[in-house]
Every structure is written in C-alpha cells, then in structure tokens.
Amino acid sequence: MKLDRRTFIKGAGASTAGCALATILPGSVGAMEPGALNAKGEEIASICEMCSTRCPISARVVGEKAVSILGNAKAKSFGGAVCARGGAGHSLLYDKQRIVKPLKRTGARGEGKWQEIEWSEAYQLISDNLNRIKAEHGPEAVAFSSKSGSLSGHLFHLAKAFGSPNTFTHATTCPGGYVIAAKAMFGGKIKRDLGNSKYIINFGHNLYEGINMSETRGMMKAQMDKGAKLVVFEPRFSIVADKADEWFAIKPGTDVTVALALCNVLIEDNLYDKAFVAQYVEGFEEFAAEVKAYTPEWAERISDVPAADIRRIAHEYAAAAPHAVVDFGHRASFTTEEFELRRALYAANVLIGNIEKKGGLYFGKKAKTYNKLAGADVTPSLGKPGVEGMPKATAKRIDQVDEQFAMCWSSGGIYQTVLDATLQGVPYHLKGWVISRSNPMQTMTDRKRVVEALNKLDFVVACDVYISETAAYADVILPECTYLERDEEISDKSGKSPAYYVRQQVVDVLGDAKPSWQIWKELGDALGLGQFFPWDNMDALQMVQVKGDAQWLNTIKTEGFVSYGVPLMLREAKMVSKFVESYPDARTPDADGTYASALTFKTPSGKIELTSAKVEAMAPGRGVIRYREVRMKKADELFFIQGKVAIHTNGATHNIPMLANLMSDNAVWIHPLTASQLGIENGDPIRLHNDTGSEEGHALLTPGIRPDTVFAYMGFGSKNKELARATGRGVHCGNLLPHVTSPVTGMNLHTTGVKISKR
Ligand SMILES: Nc1nc2c(c(=O)[nH]1)N[C@H]1C(S)=C(S)[C@@H](COP(=O)(O)OP(=O)(O)OC[C@H]3O[C@@H](n4cnc5c(=O)[nH]c(N)nc54)[C@H](O)[C@@H]3O)O[C@H]1N2
Ligand SMILES: Nc1nc2c(c(=O)[nH]1)N[C@H]1C(S)=C(S)[C@@H](COP(=O)(O)OP(=O)(O)OC[C@H]3O[C@@H](n4cnc5c(=O)[nH]c(N)nc54)[C@H](O)[C@@H]3O)O[C@H]1N2
Ligand code: SF4
Ligand SMILES: [Mo]
C-alpha cells in the first residue's frame, strides 16, 4: 500500500488523521479541585515529566491553584509547545487518587490493604529490612531500579553507598537495542537531524504518536516546510504511516532484511560514499562481502516489501545524500535480533556518509567537546559533588553472567534479570528490590513472572505518585511529589551546541509527598549512610553544579532553558565557518573548511566499526552484521504488536483523570479478512491467548493492519484495583509477552504470537 503527498496533505486536515498534529498544541488550564495547595503565582520555567522526553515547560498558577502548562518558548527546537499529556499535568497534580502519605502493607501482597504511616516509620521499616538482608546475604542481594534520568541518579547513589552493584534502568525494555548497537559501531550514542533531512526512511518509529517534541517537530518541519520525502515501513497504518509519502506494510520482525537490502543496493550499484568509507570506516570489506547475498529479491521473500521498491528507494535515498537519513528507531524490540537490526539501520546511514552532515546523524556537543574545539571555555560546564570514600561493590552484577552482555551494564543493565535472580538464584539470589518511577508489572514482559518474583522477595519498596500495578505488591510505598511540586538538579540538554535546563517547583507540595532526591538522602541517613549524602538541599546541589556562580544559576532558572554558542556539525563547512568566526582561538578548519579531521569515534579502532573485532570477541559470530532467522510466533498464531498512543504514556498515565477520560481502553486492531475467518465483528468481545497468558478485549476492525497481525496500544488493562480508572479496561500487553533476553543487547521482546477467539 502506498500514499502520495496529496493524500498526506488531505489527511492532515481530516479530523482523525490530524489527531497527532492537533495534540501538539500549547497546554491547557486545569479544573480546580478542593483541598489543594497554596500557589506561588508567577510564571515558572520547568521540565515536564508526563513522559521521559522531559520537554522544557513554562508553568503558571491561574487563580487560586489551577495550573496552566505551556512549552517554554526559549527552547526553540521544542517549538514552545507541549503535547496533550504535557498539558494535562495539573490533572495528575490534583488527582485525589494520588498517594501523598507513605503506605505500609497490612494484607497479603497485592491484596490492597494499606496503612498510612509517617516518614520516620517508613524509613525505619525499610532500613531495618535492607540492613538485615545486607547482613544475611550481602548488599548485592538488593536490586535498585528506576527509569533513567534525573530521578535515577539519587537512587543509584544510594545503591552504591549501600554496596550493591545491581542498579537497573528501563534500558532493556526500551532503548537498549539502539544504544548498544551505537556503542558497538560509533563508540557511543548518536542523534538524528530529522529537521534538516530531505529524505527520511522510517522503520516503525511512530513519532507522531510516540511523541518526542523536538524530534516530532523536526520531522514535521522536514515534511511540511522543506518538502522532505518520508518512506515508512510498518505493519500497520500508524499516524506516521498516514503522514508518509509511501507506506509499506512490512511483515513484523523482518525490518533487518530491508535494511540490509538497502545496504546491498548502495554497495552493488556503487551509490555509497567511498571517500567517507575510506576515511572513517573499519571493516567495510567484510560487511560488503556479507551483504552481497542480501539482495532486494531475498528481502522481498521474507518481508513482503517489493524488491523493485527497495531498489528504487535506495537510489532515491542516495540521490538525496548526505542530507538523508535512515531513522534508527527508538522503542525495541521487534525481534530478539535487535542488535543486528539497529546496526543494519546505522550501516545504511554510514554508507551515504551522512555523519555530522545536516539532515543526517550527529553527536551531541557537550561543553567539554565544544570548548576543546573553540580553544577556550566559551560555554560553562556543570560541576559534580565529590563524595569521599564511596564503597566499591565486591559482587558481580546479576546481569554479567555472559561476556556477550558486557556492553549492557553501563547502559542501564538487563532489567529483567531481577526476575531470574529472584526466582532461580542465577547467578545468586536477590532478596530485596527498591523500585522507583518504574512499573515493571505493566512494562516488563510476562506479568505472571513479575508477580511471582515480587511475591518471593523478602522486602519490596516502591516509590511512585500512584499505587501503580507494581507498587501494589510492595511492602512500603513512598509517595513522590509530582514534577510540578519539586526542584531538581540542572540537566545537560546539549544538541548541536551545549544547553542546560532545570526543573523547578511550581506549586507547594501536596500532602506529605517528597521529592525523590530527598527521600533517598533521608533513607541513606536511616541506613547509616548519611556521610555519603553531604548536601542539605537541592539549592546546595545546584550551587555545586554551577561551581558557585549564582548569576549563572539565576539565568538558568529564569530562562528555564539556556543554550550556548552556535550549532555545530563537524562536516558542515558553513557551520564550522560560523563557529570559527565566533571564537578566535578555535581549531583551524581543514582545507575543505570543515572539521572532518576532528571526527573520531570512541571505538577500539577510532573508526566506525561496520565490522567489529571487539564484538566478535564478546559474542563469537557477531562481529559482522548478519541476518539470522527468528521465529516470532507459531504457524497458527497471529503476530501481536504494540505501540504508543498520543494521549497516554507507557504504563504511567492511564489513571490520570483527564487522560483516562480521553481514552481508557485499547481495542485490538484486526484486519476484516482475518476477523471474518474468525467470525468476529467490529466491537465484538474477544479473547487473546498464547502460552504466556490470556487477555480479554474488544475487536476494532480496520484494513490498516496486515491480515497476519493484530495490534494494541500498550499500557492498558491494569489488574490493580487501586488504579480505579484503569482497572480491567482493555488488554494488558505484558501479560501476553514471553520472558526473553535477547543476545548482546539483553533486550526484552515486545512481539509475539497470539490466537484470537470471540468471547
Ligand atoms: N504519546 C506518547 N509518546 C511517547 C511515549 C508514550 O508512551 N506516549 N513514550 C515515549 C517512549 S518511552 C518511547 S521509547 C518513544 C517510542 O516511540 P516509538 O519507537 O515510535 O514506539 P512505539 O509506538 O512503541 O512503536 C512504533 C511503531 O512500531 C510498530 N511496530 C511494531 N512491530 C514492528 C515491526 O516489526 N516493524 C516495524 N517496522 N514496525 C513495528 C508499531 O505498530 C508502532 O506504530 O515514544 C515516546 N513518546
Ligand atoms: N508490551 C509493551 N511493553 C513495553 C512497551 C511496549 O510498547 N509494549 N514499551 C516500553 C518502553 S518504550 C518503555 S520506555 C517502558 C517504560 O516503562 P517504565 O520505565 O515502567 O515507565 P512508565 O510506564 O513511563 O512509568 C513508570 C511509573 O512511573 C510513575 N511516575 C510517574 N511520574 C513519577 C514521578 O514523578 N516520580 C515517581 N517516583 N514515579 C513517577 C508512574 O506512575 C508509573 O507507575 O515500557 C516498555 N514496555
Ligand atoms: S513529549 Fe509531551 S508528555 Fe513528554 S515531556 Fe514532552 S510535553 Fe511532556
Ligand atoms: Mo521508551
């Protein structure tokens, strides 16, 4: 199926198709509810936390206590806007179902019996239990997990002080695939310059629903202002597919074949950038030899994407080079072979030499790099509090049992190994789990196994704003105040030049909730680890960050988002010339006016490793990017895939009143042909089942999906009765997904097979 530009423009104006665009509007004013807080009154620059994109916002209390949230106009790439979820922050803030007092479990785990307690009692209870586990089993028997970002820093600091190496972010449930592939090939994370791209090839990165404000707006800018062509490979007619020039309903899990076939055409038809490859690439010959077999015809047989189209797209893409990009995607994983897929997608970029070119891929320019090139400290950098004598963990991390996972731990670890260690004692038994801003019951896979693990542990602590599905199984729940009620450290938000921003408290704290930095510091005190938290408050920490420069701190707080210098991409002569004009001591440009000679990679060879000896040593047979067949489902099952919806976030927002009112259920997308074979009609109650679990939902018949595939928006169907607005509404995706750890990246798997029947 294909769409042309005319359909795209028409679609953008229609009500349903325009939905994703319409949601990217300045925020809204919240309804007031009784029993809330004192307001500070003025316009305050801060950071959204309705999802982990963390956009810069400007929040204002209107009247007594309603909060209006807009995007911060100073953060240009975010367009001074928030999405629908960002505009709904007040609805979380004033939700009476939020927890604002520590809770102690009084019934069985998950039974829903709670007693409100004081913080002092909560800290005592937790420290008694964690210190007991430490004495009996060692500090490594306690795992600490948190979604990455400003919140995880303080919890992981506590873990370190406690002596446990077992800290985990959400990495293996989300970005681990592309992060670890980038580490292997480029030596670190790389960004995409969608806004300046003339040709974008997209493999299931649904930026118009899985919103990242600056990238979403970048892609809108490229499409609408610059006339970029967008080609989308996606098993269903997502909003991005709807806005594309061409959509190919690719078979789930086969993207790697099309990516490799694009590389095949670029090489065989001599369309690749030979000078770039010669200067920057290691292992091209081995890659080219491997890719020879991956012809478009071969890819068509596996993926259902016509060979002629793959060939044509490769030529069009090369013609737009280097201002063209193959988007390497975000949420994984579509198959267990994430490592190969993400490397193949990067390879298609490397071959056209779009690295550090407008519209291609580039590295973030933090102060250290930027100042080095400028030959002077032209942008300030952040300081860190030095903490003396932090203990070194003696035990090995639970996820480091196999050399192939060596790249995982520094990227957040293999989250689901918490279950393996708890249930099977591999490589040793966990006894405690401190979980913050993470809801694995909904967002990890195999819900039953998560329940089993939580039930088996001696002691579980959850820190959340709600009694999430996971928190419902904790022994103690610590109520964090929402992002609108707390100050945090300054964060580095550098892009093409250095940038900083800060979260600031907008309204007084509701009830007895606290910011997590304070919670973990106070728990540190209770655990007898107070010496490792030598700061009194957030002001003191921020002052260390700005190295005592109160004026700088004031600027960041007033502006909310401060960027420095001129944007820089090393291989763009115009940008380099502007940079040199701005800074008299700047590095002398190369003969071609660029900083091409400054482009190096933190890999063993210092080059882009299309083929990697390091990876070969870690995981024999994987040095070269290679197709490996994977079976995602049984022959008589349908593919079950998921994705984000524009008005909810992961497993987090389904109980927020305003968003729950907008959407509280996730009907299952089924192709009419498939439905008629199964005797299912639109709206029918259905059952989805497989070896992992069984879920009940409703059918949504649509031709916008492959007949062999069904789709549901994730995050619904909570089984926790405390989340009253979300309980039992829709299909719980995690309950149907098997527990898997993929090679090299350690990723969870979000695609599986299901059978469907009418209820
Ligand atoms: N509104 C909203 N925005 C969000 C979030 C949110 O929850 N809600 N979450 C944020 C987070 S944490 C992330 S990681 C990003 C994620 O943003 P995305 O990476 O875009 O995430 P998804 O929507 O999960 O998946 C994208 C698409 O992949 C498709 N898909 C499934 N299987 C396959 C396959 O085998 N091949 C191909 N080509 N496509 C496939 C799905 O149909 C879906 O449309 O979004 C961020 N932004
Ligand atoms: N089946 C399936 N599973 C998936 C995905 C999928 O597409 N399909 N997507 C995956 C992706 S991309 C991601 S990123 C993960 C995300 O999964 P998680 O890392 O679990 O993140 P969220 O679901 O966004 O939020 C987790 C918890 O944070 C709480 N929270 C919100 N604000 C705060 C706060 O200020 N403080 C504290 N302490 N808690 C807060 C919420 O109430 C929620 O319980 O899920 C992954 N899991
Ligand atoms: S994308 Fe939306 S919800 Fe996420 S941080 Fe930005 S404004 Fe908030
Ligand atoms: Mo994510």
Image (cartoon, grey):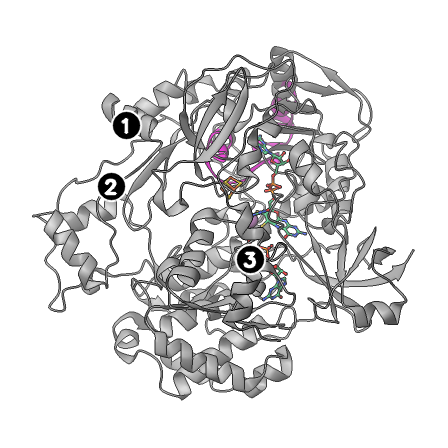
Q: Position of residue 58 (x, y in %)?
A: 42, 31
- Residue at (86, 70) in percent of width and height: 676
Q: Which residue is mark 2?
A: 564
Looking at the image, residue 465 sits to the left or right of residue 188; the answer is right
Q: Residue flagged by tag 2: what amino acid is it?
A: Tyr
Quadrant in which the N terminus is drawn: bottom right
Q: Which residue is mark 1?
A: 555
Q: Position of residue 126 (x, y in %)?
A: 63, 21
Q: Residues within 10 Å of mark 3 (few under 14, many from 20)?
A: few
In this orientation, does residue 295 appear?
A: no
Dot 1 falls on a residue whose secondary structure is helix
Looking at the image, residue 659 sits to the left or right of residue 322; the answer is right
Quadrant in which the C terminus is drawn: bottom right
Give the Cα distance between marks 1 and 3. 40 Å
The image quadrant where one finds ligand 2 is top right
Dot 2 falls on a residue whose secondary structure is loop
The one nearer the camera, 117 or 425, is 117
Q: Position of residue 198 (x, y in %)?
A: 38, 68
Magenta stretch? 128-157
Decide which of tag 1 and tag 2 comes sooner along the chain: 1
Q: Residue flagged by tag 3: what amino acid is it?
A: Gly
Decide which of tag 2 and tag 3 comes sooner along the chain: 3
| Magenta region includes residue 461 | no
Give the Cα distance between marks 1 and 2. 12 Å
Task: Determine whether 136 is above or below 576 in the image.
Answer: above
**Which image quadrant for residue 284?**
bottom left
Q: Which residue is mark 3?
A: 13
The one nearer the camera, 672 or 588, is 672
Q: Residue flagged by tag 1: what amino acid is it?
A: Thr
